[in-house]
Every structure is written in C-alpha cells, then in structure tokens.
Image (cartoon, grey):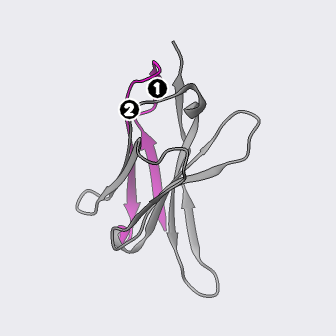
C-alpha cells in the first residue's frame, strides 16, 4: 500500500512558477513509476509527466520545456516544477504511483491539489 499526499498548489499569475510535491508513505517508494496528472474543469484527466523507477522522464507536449518532474527516493517524494504557467494549466493536479505487476498492476492516487493560473 502507498499513500500519496500532494501539496504546493495555489493561485499564481500567468508566467509564474509553482512547485508541487507528492509525499508517499508506505512501502518501497523507489520501485514505483510516478506520474503527475491533471484535470481541468469539464475535461478528462490527462497524464502530463512521468518518471520511472530508474529516473527516466517523459512529458506531454503541452508542458514540455516548462515543467520538470523529479523524485527524491530518500524523501519518498516526487516533485513537479512548473514554470511559465499559463491559464490553460489551471486544473487539479494529481500524483500517481504505478507498479507494473502482472496481471494486476498497482495504482495509487493522491487527493489532488488545485492550481489556478490567473491575473
């Protein structure tokens, strides 16, 4: 079992920055692939950034070059540094822990943190 708690959301002006944190408790954080997802009002939840257990990262095009995902296994925490924020980044941001266990992978979710980009 893994429990995830996001923090760091808030209101920021366009062009500003925020850093989200996702603290994990439970077992073996380092073996999980971690992801950040977001859900804007009236839209489906979308995956925007991932970091594997080995540290490889990937981003959706809309955030590439602006957002950076990282992890600190000693602190059981994954981060999302968000720069040059735009109004379109307004959403609830969720972190996810994924372990590709066959046949039933493990997936855990945090409760989400609101990010609002507005002047």
Q: Is residue 25 above or below residue 64?
A: below
Q: What residue did someone put label 1 on?
A: 10
- Toward the top, the furthest residue is 119
Q: Which residues are magenta?
A: 1-29
Percent position (x, y) of residue 27?
Answer: 38, 70
Percent position (x, y) of residue 71?
Answer: 32, 58
Residue, x 45% and y 47% (percent of image)?
Answer: 5
Q: Earlier in the sequence, mark 1 or mark 2?
A: 1
Residues at badges 1 and 2 in contact (C-beta under 8 Å)?
yes
Q: Is residue 68 above or below residue 34?
A: above
Residue, x 60% and y 31% (percent of image)?
Answer: 88
Percent position (x, y) of residue 97?
Answer: 49, 63
Q: Is-magenta flag for residue 15?
A: yes
Residue, x 64% and y 51% (percent of image)?
Answer: 46
Q: Residues within 10 Å of mark 1 (few under 14, many from 20)?
A: some
The numbered mark at residue 18 is: 2
Question: SS of the residue at dot 2?
Answer: strand
Judged by its main secondary structure, the magenta piece is strand
Left/right placement of residue 110 relative to residue 29 reads: right
Residue, x 52% and y 69% (percent of image)?
Answer: 98
Q: Is residue 64 above or below residue 26?
A: above
The numbered mark at residue 89 is: none
Query: Foreground: 58 or 93?
Result: 58
- Toward the left, the furthest residue is 74
- Toward the bottom, the furthest residue is 102
Query: Foreground: 104 or 41?
Result: 41
Query: Foreground: 88 or 45?
Result: 88
């Amino acid at each position: 079992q893994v429990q995830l708690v996001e923090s760091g959301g808030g209101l920021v002006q366009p062009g500003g920055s925020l850093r989200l944190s996702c603290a994990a408790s439970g077992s073996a954080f380092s073996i999980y692939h971690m992801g950040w997802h977001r859900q804007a009002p009236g839209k489906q939840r979308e995956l925007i950034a991932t970091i594997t257990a080995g540290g490889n990262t990937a981003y959706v095009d809309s955030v590439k070059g602006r957002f950076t995902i990282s992890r600190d296994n000693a602190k059981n925490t994954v981060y999302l540094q968000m720069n040059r924020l735009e109004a379109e980044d307004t959403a609830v941001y969720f972190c996810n822990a994924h372990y590709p266990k066959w046949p039933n992978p493990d997936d855990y979710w945090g409760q989400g943190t609101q990010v609002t980009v507005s002047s």
